[in-house]
Image (spheres, rainbow, N blue to C red):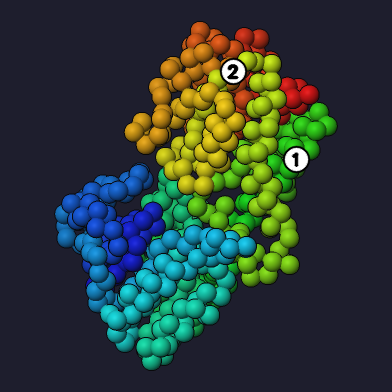
Amino acid sequence: MKKICVMGLGYIGLPTCAMFAKNGVQVVGVDILKEIVDTINKGEIHLEEPLLGDIVKDVVNEGTLRASLEPEEADVFIVAVPTPNNNDHYKSCDLNYVVSATNALLPYIKKGNLIIIESTIAPRTIDDIIVPLIKEKDFSIGSDIFLAHCPERVLPGQIIKEMIENTRIIGGYTQRCTEVASNIYEIFVTGEIVKTDAKTAEMAKLVENTFRDVNIALANELAKVCNRIDINVLSVIEMANKHPRVNIHQPGPGVGGHCLAVDPYFIIEKAPELSRLISMSRDTNSSMPYFVVDNVKKILEDIADPKIAIFGLTYKGNVDDIRESPAIKIYHMLENQGYRISLYDPYIKHDRMMIEEHDESIKDADLILILADHKEFKELDKKIIKGKMRRSRIFDTKNIVKNINTNDNDIEYINMGNLFEYIK
Ligand code: SAJ
């Protein structure tokens, strides 16, 4: 059986280690942070993801997974390190971690080895950046050693299930590389294995998230337009989506996370003058926190020294992840403008932020501002809201509340649909 060395033990690297180890492969997971390495060697995990903790515990106990600060000789090397945006004009792809992880593993490479880059990378990175690094070692790629880009496409919160069941794109530098890499994923992937070349795989991964970002931007733009001309955007989207070939996404307070808010820029950087639609969609989605703050101001215009209870700070519902979260941005903007604010989020631990209990957070508040679609917000306790708030008003930017609606007489319920009635 083969041995695999995985560089990076984050949201993708660790589940990848766990899945190979669970299927009997010897795995060494490498990370630069000692705390992470120590945690995993104890059979514990440092991030929240259903099912992952149990699998890691088992494979560490069985001895198939081990963590280390240094890479070691193996048959297959997988690079799964972050690729943030550079702080430049186009927010281009920062390849520093990918390049340094690749350089770190090169001294351990032998003839016959396979290197896989799983990190999301700008199109042509394998051809233009990684191949020259490997060629410096005098290896011939496709015969001595093999190289492929195999992007992951898993959804946080269901990583294990999706890692097994999703279609997997395998983009080899040569056809032989594609074949060799496909054999590895066949160890645990039950979804379809799609074989292509490296640059097509790079672009396909970016385009998936760009598709979603552009469609959310359309929904957000429609929300702005409809509220300008007194039309309920949520009804419009619901109706339009009854057409069999229409699927408009949902408007909201903006787009967060480490994928949709990051990946489209990697396409833009390669041909900025040709990617106007992608660029404008990014701008539209990034403008939504300002739209929310402007309208909160209007909603609260008639109240002296208002208090806002923010419900949900994560970048999306039912996760504890606040990376690139538009909710955090909105919170800081409102705070800077002098509003009294309390925070409530059932997914965030109290010591991480000034999170209060539900009842405490809405005490004397004039507005509940919902910014994440956590399932706990579907049913709100009307009695407690009526009893505790100074003014019973909700602005639900995610349209998540189901037991209170715009016709409610006791509680003023505002969402992206009827917002125009409150901001004139
Ligand atoms: N959002 C909206 N309106 C919508 C849908 C989402 O405003 O109609 C917002 C969410 O609230 C959130 C953001 O978009 O702030 C992104 O959420 P998401 O659930 O669309 O996606 P991510 O970033 O959690 O994960 C995406 C997934 N990609 C696609 O669905 C095409 C996932 O499959 C990828 O693996 C992941 O990016 C990634 O790693 O690239």
Residue 77 lies in quadrant: bottom left
Can you identify the residue that label 2 sits on? 305
Q: Residue at x 43, y 82 (%)?
A: 133
> Left or right: 200 with respect to 149?
right
Q: Residue at x 65, y 52 (%)?
A: 282
Residue 283: percent from left, percent from top: 68, 51
- Is the CB of mark 2 within 8 Å of ligand 1? no
Tag 1: residue type?
Leu
Residue 190: percent from left, percent from top: 41, 60
For the C terminus, the quadrant is top right
Most foreground residue, 56 or 343: 343
Can you identify the residue that label 1 sits on? 222
- Is the CB of mark 1 within 8 Å of ligand 1? no
> From mark 2 to mark 1, how far is it between C-alphas?
32 Å
Question: Circle 1 — which element?
Answer: helix
- Identify the mark nearer the N-term, 2 or 1: 1
Residue 128 visible in the current orientation: yes
> Left or right: 189 with respect to 209?
left
Residue 66: percent from left, percent from top: 21, 61
Q: Residue at x 44, y 43 (%)?
A: 321
Tag 2: residue type?
Asp
